[in-house]
């Protein structure tokens, strides 16, 4: 058995080799298969019978075989820069569509999207159309209206139209919010010691917040802002560049990024507003959660190591604890209210 063969679990399953149900090994290994014009590598899942010494002691169910083939075809798609079956599914779910409805919206046959999600590899033309529809909800609405005759249920057509309009509104608000962030950074377009010698990168901010939210329980807005600052500062200390390009200022609760309020309103950031009683007053606090519906670009391996170190340091800190800790930083003690915190203070951070 080679080194890339991994035991996933031991499960009870009908074994066609022994013609009975017993405990078998569910395993995964790297395999290769020819898909169209390419040899692609993929993760093959299979069962291994442990009650026979025969060389032929492996088997797969029909569902497992279908999934293995889909994995191989999705890797082919990735190599050809095509949408994977899961990405196609995410687009139609974004607009609240069934497989048939997405086919109708695009003007295709009823089962075309079903085939794309299960076994058929789309051609580049339809791949481009699906990408355009995903990127532009106004275009999705145009496609819906142009293919209205395909929708026999008018009530359902109206529901889909409303779903798309909600996406348009959400995308518009997100666009305007990002514009407001960029306006506030208009004086920091050049790389400098104030932005950590990196231009503002909103996608990287989204990725960093998602990464932190996935690994920190009880994450609230103020603590998140501190974790962003420590991540940027530590990366600057070790790699001479911030991760996000954010500019931080000295505020009562420590270092806060310019446009911090807009950052937590980004569409990619999932927030729950909670009531908190403080000195007989009810305050609204913002609980940050991982957004499983939003796909962000991955952090680099170097960036992940930096952020992991920050999270490990502060994972047990509540908001007050991390604020108190930050107040003792040289970067805070030697700056004044509203003053920009120079990234050169990174060499003094206590982490």
Image (spheres, rainbow, N blue to C red):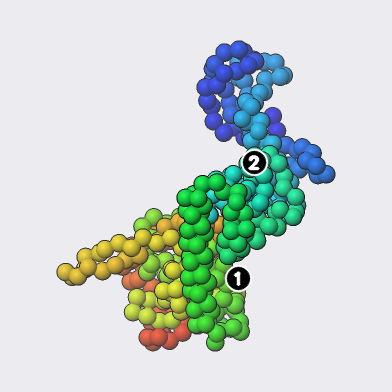
Horizontal and vertical percent position of residue 122: 72, 48
- Asked if the residue under mark 1 is in contact with the one under mark 2, i.e. CB atoms within 8 Å, the reply is no
How far apart are labels 2 and 1 at the CA level? 51 Å
User: Which class describes the residues within 10 Å of circle 2: few (<14), some (14-19), or many (20+)?
Assistant: some
Mark 2 or mark 1, which is nearer to you? 2
Relative to 305, residue 240 above or below:
below
Residue 148 appears in which quarter of the rendering? bottom right
Question: Residue at (46%, 79%) from the top-left corner?
Answer: 258
Question: Residue at (35%, 71%) from the top-left corner?
Answer: 323
Direction from residue 103 to residue 76 in the image, left or right: right
Name the element at disc 1: helix
Viewer-proximal residue among 317 and 279: 279
Q: How many marks?
A: 2
User: Any mark on residue 111, and which?
Assistant: 2
Residue 142 appears in which quarter of the rendering? bottom right
The residue singled out by tag 1 in the image is 239
Q: Going by the picture, which residue comes out furthest to the left?
A: 280
Relative to 190, residue 308 above or below:
above
Of the two numbered discs 2 and 1 on the same chain, state the one appearing first in sequence.
2
- The answer to whether residue 260 of the structure is visible from this angle is yes
Question: Residue at (48%, 66%) from the top-left corner?
Answer: 169
Q: Going by the picture, which residue comes out furthest to the top?
A: 19
Viewer-proximal residue among 308 and 107: 107
């Amino acid at each position: 058995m080679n080194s890339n063969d991994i035991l996933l679990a031991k499960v009870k399953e009908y074994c066609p080799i022994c013609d009975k149900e017993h405990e078998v090994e569910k395993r995964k290994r790297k395999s290769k298969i020819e898909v169209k014009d390419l040899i692609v590598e993929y993760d093959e899942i299979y069962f291994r019978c442990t009650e026979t010494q025969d060389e032929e002691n492996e088997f797969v169910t029909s569902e497992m075989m279908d999934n293995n083939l889909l994995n191989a075809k999705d890797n082919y798609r990735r190599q050809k820069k095509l949408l994977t079956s899961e990405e196609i599914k995410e687009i139609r779910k974004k607009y609240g569509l069934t497989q048939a409805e997405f086919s109708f919206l695009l003007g295709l046959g009823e089962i075309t999207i079903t085939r794309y999600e299960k076994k058929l590899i789309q051609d580049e033309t339809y791949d481009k159309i699906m990408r355009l529809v995903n990127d532009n909800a106004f275009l999705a609405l145009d496609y819906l209206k142009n293919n209205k005759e395909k929708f026999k249920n008018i009530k359902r057509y109206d529901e889909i139209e409303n779903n798309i309009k909600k996406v348009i509104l959400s995308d518009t608000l997100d666009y305007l919010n990002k514009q407001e962030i960029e306006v506030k950074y208009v004086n920091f377009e050049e790389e400098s010691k104030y932005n950590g010698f990196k231009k503002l990168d909103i996608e990287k901010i989204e990725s960093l917040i998602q990464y932190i939210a996935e690994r920190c329980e009880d994450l609230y807005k103020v603590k998140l802002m501190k974790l962003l600052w420590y991540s940027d500062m530590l990366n600057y200390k070790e790699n001479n560049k911030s991760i996000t390009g954010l500019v931080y200022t000295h505020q009562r609760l420590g270092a806060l990024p310019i446009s911090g309020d807009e950052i937590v309103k980004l569409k990619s950031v999932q927030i729950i507003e909670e009531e908190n009683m403080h000195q007989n007053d009810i305050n609204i606090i913002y609980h940050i959660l991982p957004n499983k519906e939003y796909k962000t670009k991955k952090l680099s391996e170097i960036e992940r190591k930096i952020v992991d170190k920050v999270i490990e340091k502060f994972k047990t800190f509540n908001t007050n604890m991390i604020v108190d800790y930050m107040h003792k930083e040289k970067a805070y003690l030697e700056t004044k209210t509203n003053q920009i915190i120079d990234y050169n203070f990174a060499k003094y951070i206590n982490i």
